[in-house]
Amino acid sequence: MLEALLKERRVRIKYENFEGAAEVVRAEPLSLLLHHHRLYLVVRMQGGRLRPLRFARISQVEALEKFVYPAEVDYSPEAVFRDSYGVFLTREDLGR
């Protein structure tokens, strides 16, 4: 998995979805994300949709052909997940 991520290789992943059903996902791995002590692989699906896959639910990975990792203007993890993951503080929390 990490080799495919680092070497910009598309992947075919056998994945257990939220309902417990097995599915095969073909995607471009973009980022690893740690959230609430759980590791996720963020992938770009065919068609461009981003999807976080919980690492523990991945049972098989096959590296496929190369792809070009998107430029920051096209994919910025900080921008994409700014309002989805992380700690949110208000001005009151900061004492301002």
Image: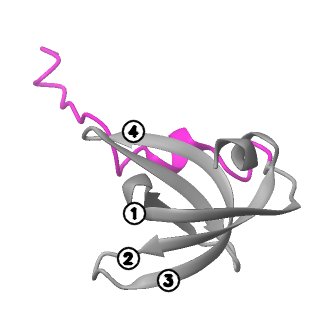
> Which mark sits nearer the N-terminus, 1 or 2?
2
Q: Residues within 10 Å of mark 3 (few under 14, many from 20)?
A: few
> What separation in Å lies between label 3 and label 1 (alpha carbons)?
11 Å
Residue holding disc 1: 57
Which residue ends up furthest to the top in the rendered image?
A: 95
Residue holding disc 2: 17
Q: Eyeballing the image, is 7 above or below 64? A: above
The amino acid type found where label 1 is placed reads: Arg
Q: Are marks 3 and 1 in contact (CB under 8 Å)?
A: no
Query: Residue at 31% across / 38% down in the picture?
Result: 86
> Which mark sits nearer the N-terminus, 4 or 3?
3
> What separation in Å lies between label 2 and label 4 (alpha carbons)?
18 Å
Q: Residues within 10 Å of mark 1 (few under 14, many from 20)?
A: some
Q: Nearer the viewer, mark 1 or mark 4?
A: 1
Residue holding disc 3: 23
Q: Residues within 10 Å of mark 4 (few under 14, many from 20)?
A: some
Query: Residue at 35% across / 51% down in the picture?
Result: 84
Q: Are marks 3 and 2 in contact (CB under 8 Å)?
A: yes
Q: Are marks 2 and 4 in contact (CB under 8 Å)?
A: no
> What separation in Å lies between label 1 and label 4 (alpha carbons)?
15 Å
Q: Residue 24, located in which quarter of the rendered image? A: bottom right
* Residue 60 percent across, percent down from the top left: 57, 65
Which secondary structure lies at badge 1? helix
The magenta stretch is: 71-96
> Which mark sits nearer the N-terminus, 3 or 1?
3
**Main SS of residues in magenta:** loop
The amino acid type found where label 4 is placed reads: Leu
Q: Eyeballing the image, is 69 above or below 53? A: above
* Residue 72 percent across, percent down from the top left: 73, 42
